[in-house]
Amino acid sequence: MIFDKSIAAFNEAIKHIPGGVNSPVRAFKSVNNSPVFISKAKGSKVYDIDGNEYIDYVGTWGPAILGHADSDVIDAISKAAAGGTSFGAPTLLETEMAKLIKYMIPSIESVRMVNSGTEATMSALRLARGYTKRELVVKFEGCYHGHGDSFLIKAGSGALTLGEPSSPGVTSGTAHSTLTAKFNDLSSVYDLFSKYGEQIAAVILEPITGNMGVVAPTREFITGVRDICTKYGTVLIFDEVMTGFRVASGGAQQLLEIKPDLTTLGKIIGGGLPVGAYGGKKEIMDCLSPKGPVYQAGTLSGNPLAMAAGYATLSKINNNPNFYGQLEDKALYLEKKINVLINRYSIPAVYNRVGSMSTLFFTELETVETFDDVMTCDTSKFAQYFNLSLNAGIYLAPSQFEAGFVSIAHTQYDLDKTLEALELAFARL
Ligand SMILES: *Cc1c(COP(=O)(O)O)cnc(C)c1O
């Protein structure tokens, strides 16, 4: 494949945009490459400015569950746009959207729309602190909740010490109110609660992780986290920005049969436009301004184009009773065949999958269940695999620590073509 135009475009972009991109992972740094510039996308395919076609497993990092440029979504956006792109005043569709979200995710009794996943998690955290009148928050190593200051924190030097900033620009004051536990290690959560329990406003986690790659929680872990939050009056926040409407119509909480107190949403809920949302128990949500004292606002929140795209996407999912069955069939087909290839070519790798989210971890381990397991991965092998796949017309997420997504638009032909390309890559690893 020829990438000349993308290479030139990146060299130009670097002069004007920090690192040439508007979000770091797009720079392809961890796969020792430079990004392909996308010209258009349709269905399961994306096309770059050199004219190369790819079968896409990034799906704009999750939102494209219907495939790209779905005609119903595009129609809804066009219709809305013709009537004006923003009013900063209430519209009927915002209420319809809230009703549909509540119907699909029953733990949500009231919901506020925002403009990104980051905004949803930041706001949910402020709300939890305002509601409980406590300051500390527990998050988990390997979980990602956007770029809010409270989340750019790593564990302090001792297991029970307060956090330290993981990015310059985050104050130590902020870091000191974030504690870090280990995913799938309940004792790490108990330890923090035994020391700080009465001060912990919220526990936030990806109930099924995607941002360290796909890792499902053990039953013991997720029920234990729910129970200890209930015991201490701590707000349990499921960050379902990725898993919401992805692993089931009711998100990870439906699969796991655990009700969080608050849920954050993003990605699919915007149908490809910039949207986030947070919602949950009415008693907590009613603390939000203008009903309650906790402030949060947004000029473009509930934007008519974003609501139109999101509503069209969610309705399409909701109106197809076998939507997730069809996705499961496609994803399971890939999983089975990829596992055959892993064995045939003796690739040291573990394929984790929940529904249409999956990660191929390049590790010698037999299973990947924790952040420490994830950290054993051979990222240079992943980089090789990524670049071989890209050259064969398969567009994967450019990092070992990400999820790949199958959309409803992926055809049997796409899946078989993908497997052929992956087999060639495996043969050369
Ligand atoms: C993507 C993501 C976010 C951040 O959402 P943005 O829209 O990128 O701000 C937060 N949490 C999770 C779990 C995500 O996957």
Image (tube, rainbow, N blue to C red):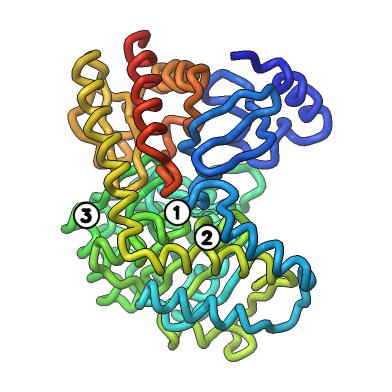
Mark 2 burial class by Cα count in 10 Å: few <14, some 14-19, many 20+: many
Q: Is residue 278 left or right of residue 226?
A: right
Q: Is residue 173 in view from this perspective?
A: no
Residue name at image x 40 percent, y 55 percent? 246
Label 3: element kind: helix
* Badge 2 residue CB within 8 Å of ligand 1: yes
Given residues 347 and 378, the one toward you in this image is 347
Q: Is residue 215 in view from this perspective?
A: yes
Under mark 1, the amino acid is Met
Q: On the image, which quarter does residue 10 sit in? A: top right
Under mark 2, the amino acid is Gly
Q: How far across and down, in percent of the image, does residue 217 sit?
A: 25, 52
Residue name at image x 48 percent, y 70 percent? 135
* Badge 1 residue CB within 8 Å of ligand 1: yes
Which residue does the numbered mark 3 point to in the structure image?
Answer: 187
Under mark 3, the amino acid is Ser
Q: On the image, which quarter does residue 341 sit in? A: top left
